[in-house]
Structures are given as C-alpha cells and as structure tokens.
Image: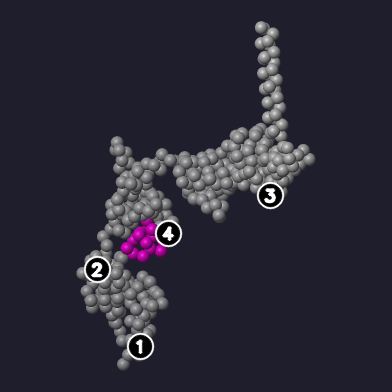
Amino acid sequence: MASKKKVSKVKKVSKVSKANKTSIRSSEPQTMEELLAGYVAPITVSRGQKIKGKITAITKQNVVVDIGGKSEGLVAERAFAEAKDFIKTLKAGDEITASVLIPETPDGYTILSLRTASYDSTWRKIEDSQKTGKPIKVTGKSSNSAGVMVEIDNLSGFIPTSLLGKSAASNTQALIGSRFDALVIESNRDQNKIVLSEKDVSEAAQIKLALDALSKVKEGEVYEGQVTKIYSFGAFVKIKIPGKMGKSTPIEGLVHVSELSWQKVSDPKEKVSEKEKVKVKVIGKVGGKLALSIKQAEPDPWIDAAKMYKKDAKVKGKVVKISDYGAFVQLTPGVEGLVHMTKIPPGEKLEVGREVNVYVEDIDSKTRKLSLGLVLTRKPVGYK
C-alpha cells in the first residue's frame, strides 16, 4: 500500500511540472510581432532637455535619478552645490524634473541639473511667505546706506534700511554672512524683484502693539505729540495711545509739509523743531500709517475771514510772494489774497515783505480764494 501512495505523489508532481513548462513557453514571444511589441527602446536625451525622473538615492555628494533610460541620471559637483538647499527638501522616491547637462559620460551616466527645479521651488517659498506672513531664512551678502542685500537659495533680495529693526540697523555689518529670518513683503517673479523686512520679524511684538494702538485711533481726534524727525517733505510726530494697565503705546505719524501751518511753508524747519511738543489732529490712516495735521489742530482762519473782510473793505497786508500773474498779500496768518497784475499800476513795484494797503474785491471762504486790489496813495504814472 505504501508503495502505491508514493507513485501517486510522483505522478502528481510530474503533472504540475509539465503544466509549468507549458505556461513558461506560452509567455515567451513566439513570433516577430510579439518580440517587437515587448521591446523598449533606450531613451535618448540631448543637452538642455527637460526630463522627469524618480530619485533612487541621495548622498552627501550626489543625487541618483532613475530617468527610465539605459543609464541613470546624476546630480553631482557644481550642480549639486548650487541646488543643495533644494536637495535638503528631497528624499528617495520623489519625482523631479531636471535639465540635461551631459547626455552621457564615459561611465554611462547622464549628468543633470536641478537649477530650474530649485528656482521654481524657491519662488514658491517666496510667494508663500508673502501670502501667509511666514518668515523665510536669508543670508546677508552686502550692505550700503540704502539697506542690505540678501541671498535666498541663490536668489537675491533686498531689505531697505527702513525695514531693519533698531538692532540690525545700528550694525548692518553684523548681518553679512549671517543667516536670519525675514518676511517677504513684495515680490515680482518677472522682474526678479524681492523686497523683505527684518523688522517685521525681530520687532514683531512691538509692531503688533503699534497696530493694536493704531486700531484705537480715530480720525478727527487731537493728540499731544512730540516732533521726532524733520525732512523736506514734512515732520514725523510721536503720539502715545493709552492701553491696558495704564500703559501707553507710542506710534509715529507724518505731518506733511502742507499740513504744518495754515500759512505756506517752504522749509519745515522754519515751523517746527525736533523734540518740540505740538498738538496734532488725525486726518487719515492708510496701510498702517498715520497721517497727522498740526494746522487742523488749530482754528481755521478762513472760518472767520468772510466776516472780517467784507467786499470793498480796505485793509493792510504784507506781500509774501511775487508771481508772473501778480502778488500774493497776506492779511492775517493763513489768509492770503491775490492782487492780479492787471490791478498793479505801471511803475508800481511790489516786493516781498512790503506792507501795502489793499481793498477786498471778492472773497470765498469755501474755496479759500481772495481777490484784492491796491489802494492807490498817489497818481499813477501817465494818469491825466
């Protein structure tokens, strides 16, 4: 009985073996058409060609890429160094798009560059920083009076002096060669323009306090402030906004030269000086910036001008400006009128600073226009 069972088992194995052989023969190409259908031609590449592949390995010196051809792609040496920050974000199995530098080396490799992929990745990082308000790492390269040039993964950016925190602004050389955080506030890929702010990172807490204080300020309110800086276009004034626990937050606003006085001001330093205490009126809040006015914190002289200066009334004034079409005469600070050139007799010479007698021809306090005529004290030349 035992012998019969053994024979039976052998027969079964023999049958399976024959079936396997039949299966193997059926899977092999039997005709030329089947042979050609299963043939995969090696991929040929040319210099500069963009090619997709999958990373198979990353070492300290190169990146190996399966590009589906008879050889492997390799990112090495200079190409590896220029994309090192981008390579740090990659791992085996990632699909990438690379440019062909050398189609085939004597060793059988295709040398690749990740410059374009790195460039695209860096721009995505920059645009994301601007959109989300998330800082990015930059490296200081050089500095001048205008600001600091920085590098972001082989792209160049600029931080203006006004966007450096107090500590950084006081010693810009300390930033050169250093790696620090900055926030992208403006970018244009077509123009290759990147503007960043170091202040928005290093002084984020102070800026938040200032923005919170700014939100409490309302247009039309009058504050006591102190002049901090004076420029040709106006003066900056610091005001303090009351906060919690009796603490106040100082914020700065600009008083434009046209808002320094009801009188015309050519040089702001003639009207205000640094550290001088002044009253200012809030006239606007635009883009987180405060617009202030010194003149609007004072009574408007034109409000009473129509009552004080009736038509045909004779008054005294001082010549403050000579133009091609006449002379401007100031009646009171902030209220000026024009004596048109046709109202100035031949031979009559008016000079800045001269006091003259004039009469009111017309006045419109709403448009702040005042037309004057000279009161003649002697007979004009040629008059009969």
Separation (CA) of disc 1 from disc 4: 44 Å
Q: Which residue is drawn at 24% across and 65% down?
A: 303
Q: Residue at x 69, y 8 (%)?
A: 3
Residue 30 picture quarter: top right
Mark before the other along the chain sequence, 3 or 2: 3
Residue 318 is situated, as x and y percent measured from the top left of the image, at 32, 71
Neighbour tally class for label 1: few under 14, some 14-19, many 20 plus, Cα within 10 Å: few
Residue type, numbered disc 1: Val
Camera-side mark, 3 or 1: 3
Camera-side mark, 3 or 2: 3
Write down the residue under mark 1. Answer: 381
Image quarter where the C terminus lies is bottom left
Residue 28 picture quarter: top right
Neighbour tally class for label 4: few under 14, some 14-19, many 20 plus, Cα within 10 Å: few
- Which residue range is magenta in the image? 255-272
Write down the residue under mark 2. Answer: 305
Image quarter where the N terminus lies is top right
Q: In this view, does 379 lie above or below 227?
A: below
Write down the residue under mark 4. Answer: 233
Relative placement, left or right, of 252 versus 142 is left
Residue type, numbered disc 4: Phe
Residue 137 is situated, as x and y percent measured from the top left of the image, at 54, 40
